[in-house]
Amino acid sequence: MAETLLEVVDLKKYFPITSGLFDKVVGYVKAVDGVSFALRSGECLALVGESGSGKTTVGRTLLRAYQPTDGRVSFHLDGEAIDVMDADEEELKGLRRHMQMIFQDPYASLNPRMTVFEIVGEPLLVHGIKDGAQREERVRQLMDQVGLNPQHMRRYPHAFSGGQRQRIGIARALALHPRMIVADEPVSALDVSVQAQILNLLQNLQDDLGLTYLFIAHDLSVVRHIADRVAVMYVGKIVEEAPVDALFSRPRHPYSEALMAAAPVADPAQRQPPLLLQGEVADPSNPPAGCPFHPRCRHATSQCKTEVPTLQSIETDHAVSCHRAEELHLSGMSS
């Protein structure tokens, strides 16, 4: 088993709700509420769930783009566990050489007033590579690595397609030789044919450079293609975590089953009747008592309405937060 690169323990991120003339805090949106997981070196762990489940907030908080409310994030570097949450600005700057992010929107994430050379070379400049010729050579290498013509480095982002812009974003993330990349839905804004190209690029880069991915997505077919393990989130919590094959063949949480039932299937012969969830996604500022999923769950009991389930291991490398996980027989997703 590969060594742990990133360890997240009880991570929380609450956004205050204010009201009145003096912006008095009257409550909190619990976007991330006690998330724990370990990311192993060289693997791809996918975070999945509906919009608003807290996936992106997890990624941005563990990189300190958002300041955490509570929790611990340890990044293991050269045999030393570095506490990301307690790092000061100088330490955080050093850590960010090893922890980078690919953003969802290839149009909004690139500065339209900067050339590709300036965009991709900016991390190098920030981290002390002042020599222009050295930066230009590195940008040429990166553009070639992600499948772009290095001769186009003096062009501006508007001259590129959406897929090419995402390749620019990937090149920028690779500039400092990171060990871990948080990929925040990196293909959701792209055409389907381009999605496949970008996914194949990410996999090739992982193999060639030994990268570790935290891959945030809502498209289960994409997750099945690229991930080694999957963590399913609902209202700021992880409700199931398992190897990708185990999760897709036999989910153990009713929410995981519902996500798979909602995914489109290409073969009409393999399509299953839709599994429609009742009600709306729970409000993270006022979650229901007990299991947050119980108002929408067809398997809920009185225990589910009063007791909060904990994430517990039920099989090797398979954990689930459900009172009835051992007794339910849920449907997975066809191949």
Image (cartoon, rainbow, N blue to C red):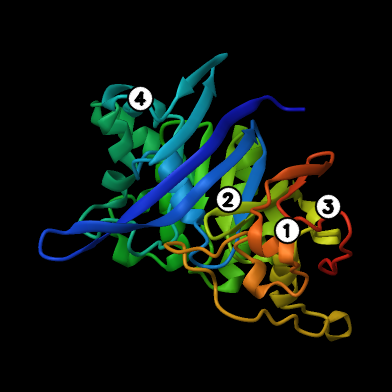
User: Based on the displayed image, in which of its 4 quarters is residue 2 positioned?
Assistant: top right
Please report the residue visible at 59 percent of the width from the left and 36 percent of the height from the top: 211
* Label 4 or label 1, whichever comes before in sequence order: 4
* Label 2 or label 1, whichever comes before in sequence order: 2
| Crowd rating for badge 2 (residues with CA inside 10 Å; few <14, some 14–19, many 20+) | many
Q: Quadrant of the N terminus?
A: top right
Disc 4 residue type (three-letter): Ala
The residue that disc 3 covers is 246
Tell me if residue 319 can be seen.
yes
Disc 2 residue type (three-letter): Phe
Left or right of residue 100: residue 27 = left
What whole-number distance in Å separates the C-alpha atoms at marks 2 and 4?
24 Å
What whole-number distance in Å separates the C-alpha atoms at marks 2 and 1?
11 Å
In the rendering, at what x and y percent does residue 17 appear?
29, 60
Left or right of residue 39: residue 20 = left
* Label 3 or label 4, whichever comes before in sequence order: 4
**Between marks 4 and 1 in the image, the one whose residue lies nearer the viewer:** 4
Left or right of residue 187: residue 176 = left
Mark 4 residue element: loop
* Label 2 or label 4, whichever comes before in sequence order: 4
User: Based on the displayed image, in which of its 4 quarters is residue 18 positioned?
Assistant: bottom left
Mark 3 residue element: helix
* Label 3 or label 2, whichever comes before in sequence order: 2
In the rendering, at what x and y percent does residue 261 appear?
75, 75
The residue that disc 2 covers is 215
What whole-number distance in Å separates the C-alpha atoms at marks 3 and 2?
18 Å
Label drawn at residue 290: none
